[in-house]
Image: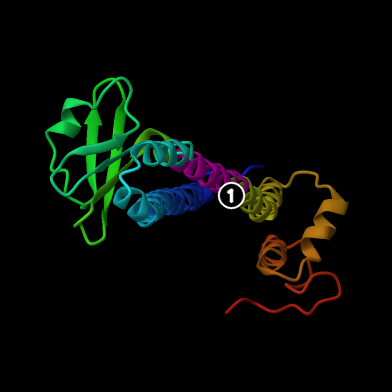
Amino acid sequence: MKIQKLFQKTRFGIFALFGLIVLSTSFLCIYTVDTQLSAEYASNSKDIAKTIANASVDILLNRNLATLQSMIDQFVEIQGIRYIYITSEEGEYLAHTFVPGIPEEILASDPSSTEPVERSIPGLGDFLEVGSPILAGVAGTVHVGMDLDIVALKIQRAIGQQVILISIFLVVGVLASIWLVNLAAKPLGGLLSYAVDLADDRKQDKQEDDELLARDDEVGDLARLFRHISGNSPGVGGPGGSAEKPG
């Protein structure tokens, strides 16, 4: 006989607990990965801008713009970097990687600003732009634009791996909890069947009864008590046990 209703709340509680753990862990993982990777890419872009600024000093002093253009063309090959442009202290665009020309959104911005800013350029995408001054700004400013779509893709991949791992834990945990609940319900079902057979005076399976009566837990105690009350045993203690009345 199956025990279903007794463990309904237990099963629901286990499902709710695992669901809460998965949701809270997933949200925390998404927030942490998103924050850390975004900060890491912004920091890397800032470092690249500083590197270009430091390497541009001698080139700008010699007004060798061809070498300057060649240098930033090499840096733009780094994954995630979509554009680089360098402006003079007067705001003149000395070199850039835009093809065929500088977008209006860039031309309308402050060329001397070095604060990180998110830009949406039609036809190109969304970018995080960081800047670095050259000689404290007296020789110009380097601007580096990082493709946010690539950053978002990397974040999604990292989060996806975490969510898959958490989901595996959820499925395994739920299946294990169901197995454990059924493991606890099985002896209770046997006890219930035993009590019904005693009450209806039905023919019983001696081997199953002996196994039930031999248990040293609460189920065995209840089985021996039921047998004592039914008058089929000399006492609660089972075969060879002493007869004692409950209470």
- The residue closer to the viewer here, 180 or 3, is 180
The quadrant of the picture occupied by the N terminus is: top right
**Residue 44 screen position, x and y as percent:** 41, 53
* Magenta-colored segment: predominant secondary structure: helix
Please give the name of the residue rendered at 37% of the width and 49% of the height, measured from the top-left corner. Answer: 45
Residue 171 is a magenta residue:
yes
The percent position of residue 221, horizontal first and vertical second, equals 69, 69
Residue at the far front: name it: 62
Q: Is residue 187 left or right of residue 7?
A: right
Front position in the image: 214 or 169: 169
Task: Describe the element under mark 1 as helix, strand or loop.
Answer: helix
Inspect the image, locate mark 1, and give the three-letter code of the amino acid beneath it.
Answer: Phe
Q: Residue 232: x percent and y percent? A: 77, 61
- Image location of residue 184, percent across then percent down: 65, 56
Q: Which residues are magenta?
A: 153-173
User: In the picture, residue 233 is in which quadrant?
Assistant: bottom right
